[in-house]
């Protein structure tokens, strides 16, 4: 049976300040295909173009050339409104810095993407958020302010939030970088569980070779080009 392609990059280039004295090409013809259920490590040195690549895959930035398909949708032809809608429904983000709203509870943080998508709050949204918190082991902390949680707990809340819209792709940008070894292992195991149980495609960026070795595939980004 053929694998289902969820992300495909063809000849992706990114040039900053084109036509100026400071023109810089950061990505040089990237070709990459991710399938449903992939769990890929991206191993990167500093200044390799990793952030630019993730921003393009995550529909936060547009390439200068090439095409990007998310599922069957060719995204480079979409306007900003359609890109925002597609991003919100198909891509989840987990960052090194969790970016939680610290003045809100853990439950309210997970509810935010659901409320943004529907424009309102209802008991079904609260129940969905509670189920997600329970899936990451944090239901007992649902009413705790996010700023009062530990670093590992905050990162688990951010994973629950990233899964709120049941995305096909989860982009995890050094999600264990600020955590101790035990918390990092818990977060990694949680992402792996989501990958296996839900078939979510995970792109896991890390500088940790031990964690990279536990992924199914390793993608090396060097000087704006990919080595698989």
Image (cartoon, rainbow, N blue to C red):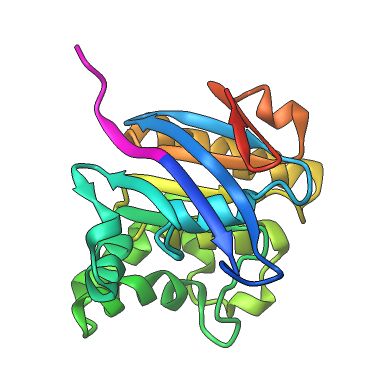
| Residue 113 image point, x, y percent | 35, 72
Q: Quarter of the image holding residue 122?
A: bottom left
| Residue placed most toward the observer, 99 or 102 | 99
Q: Residue at x 29, y 52 (%)?
A: 166
Q: Residue at x 29, y 54 (%)?
A: 90
Tell me the quadrant of the picture where the C terminus can be found: top right
Residue 4 among those drawn in magenta: yes
Rendered position, 2 above or below 151: above
- Can residue 47 be seen at all in this image of the molecule? yes
| Residue placed most toward the observer, 10 or 7 | 10
- Can residue 194 be seen at all in this image of the molecule? no
Q: Quarter of the image holding residue 5?
A: top left
Q: What type of secondary structure mainly makes up the magenta span? A: strand
Q: Residue at x 42, y 34 (%)?
A: 195
| Residue placed most toward the observer, 105 or 68 | 68
Q: Quarter of the image holding residue 52?
A: bottom right
Rendered position, 102 above or below 65: below
Q: Is residue 164 left or right of residue 184?
A: left
Q: Residue at x 64, y 43 (%)?
A: 224
Q: Is residue 35 left or right of residue 23?
A: left
Q: Is residue 11 left or right of residue 35?
A: right
Residues in magenta?
Answer: 1-10
| Residue 7 image point, x, y percent | 34, 40
| Residue 105 image point, x, y percent | 51, 79
**Count of picture labels:** 0
Residue 100 among those drawn in magenta: no
């Amino acid at each position: 049976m053929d694998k289902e392609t969820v992300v495909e990059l063809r000849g992706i280039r990114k040039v900053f300040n084109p036509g100026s004295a400071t023109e810089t090409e950061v990505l040089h013809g990237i070709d990459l295909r991710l399938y449903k259920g992939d769990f890929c490590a991206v191993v990167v040195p500093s200044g390799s173009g990793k952030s630019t690549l993730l921003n393009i895959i995550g529909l936060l930035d547009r390439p200068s050339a090439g095409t990007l398909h998310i599922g069957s949708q060719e995204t480079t032809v979409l306007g900003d409104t359609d890109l925002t809608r597609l991003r919100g429904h198909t891509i989840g983000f987990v960052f090194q810095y969790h970016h939680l709203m610290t003045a809100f509870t853990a439950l309210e943080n997970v509810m935010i993407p659901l409320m943004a998508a529907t424009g309102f709050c209802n008991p079904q949204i609260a129940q969905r958020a509670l189920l997600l918190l329970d899936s990451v082991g944090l239901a007992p902390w649902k009413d705790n302010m996010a700023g009062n949680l530990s670093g590992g707990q905050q990162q688990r809340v951010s994973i629950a939030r990233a899964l709120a819209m049941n995305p096909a792709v989860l982009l995890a940008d050094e999600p264990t970088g600020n955590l101790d070894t035990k918390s990092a292992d818990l977060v990694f195991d949680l992402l792996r569980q989501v990958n296996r149980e839900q078939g979510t495609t995970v792109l896991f960026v890390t500088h940790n070779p031990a964690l990279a070795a536990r992924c199914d595939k390793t993608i090396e980004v060097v000087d704006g080009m990919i080595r698989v």
